[in-house]
Image (spheres, rainbow, N blue to C red):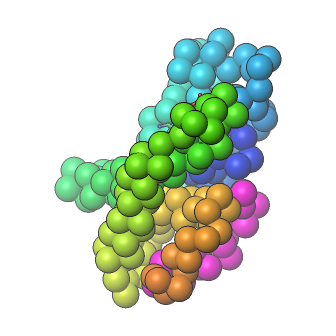
Amino acid sequence: MKLIGSAASPYVRKVRVVMAEKRLDYQFVIEDVWSADTTISSANPLGKVPCLIMDGSEAMFDSRVIVEYLDTLSPVGKLIPQQSRERAEVKTWEALADGVMDAGVLWRLEATWAKRGDGERSQAWMDRQRGKVLAGIAAMAKGLGDKPFCSGIHLSLSDIAVGCAVGWISHRFPEIDWRADHTNLARLYDKLMLRPSFADTAP
Ligand code: GSF
């Protein structure tokens, strides 16, 4: 398997953490999707990473599809429950964490994308996305409460997605002090960072 991605992308990190937790082998191919000569659209017409290339088959994207597929490849460390209710709960956690990343990406692109002139940047749009980031982080902290994991009694995709979201927020928006505001989330992230899957993929 070949995973096309970048070291900084939180969506790519989610896939890499899942690969590591499931003890799956893959080749990591770095691609800068923002460079003029990127060839990512030959694999993913949407021009986005992560993108998984399986031997002799079509490319697979996006991160949610990839991690759901990877979880079926090995019984080692099941990350998504089979039971429909628990499964939906984990997928909702993932949607929340991905939503924080999505809003953060929109905010950052509005603020920094080189092809947008200064007069074209909308503060109202950035504020809107910032509000989603903060609300999403607060909801993750509330959902976690004083439990050891986001859902269930052991590590699941919920924790992985949440860890990738808050880790990336610290990386791109160091001024957002989510660790001080939500000490339970900080505790979860510190615990995740003790795992090689997280430590080896920090942005
Ligand atoms: C999001 C992937 C994405 O936006 C997923 O895989 O879960 N829902 C998708 N990837 C970004 C890189 S990043 O911001 O992490 C990307 O490839 N953007 C390129 C573009 O042209 O938007």
Q: Is residue 70 visible?
A: no
Picture residue at 31% right of the left edge, 73% below the top: 143
189 inside magenta stretch = yes
Picture residue at 73% right of the left edge, 16% below the top: 39
Spot occupied by residue 139 in the image (x, y as percentages of width and height): 33, 69
158 inside magenta stretch = no
Please tell me whether the stretch drawn in magenta is mainly helix, strand or loop. helix
Quadrant of ligand 1: it is: top right
Find the residue positioned furthest to the front. 119
Q: Is residue 111 visible?
A: yes
Spot occupied by residue 119 in the image (x, y as percentages of width and height): 57, 36
191 relative to 6 in the view: left or right? left
Spot occupied by residue 103 in the image (x, y as percentages of width and height): 45, 49
Say if 17 sits above or below 162 in the image.
above
Find the residue positioned furthest to the left. 85
Picture residue at 34% right of the left edge, 83% below the top: 145
Picture residue at 32% right of the left edge, 77% below the top: 142
Query: Where does the N terminus fall, quadrant-wise?
Result: top right
Say if 193 sits above or below 9 in the image.
below
Q: Nearer the viewer, residue 125 or 195?
A: 125
Q: Quadrant of residue 85?
A: bottom left
Q: Nearer the viewer, residue 49 or 115?
A: 115
96 relative to 55 in the view: left or right? left
Q: Quadrant of residue 109?
A: top right
Q: Nearer the viewer, residue 142 or 190?
A: 142
81 relative to 15 in the view: left or right? left
Q: Quadrant of residue 33?
A: top right
Say if 126 sits above or below 155 in the image.
above
106 relative to 21 in the view: left or right? left
Give the extent of the magenta segment: 184-203
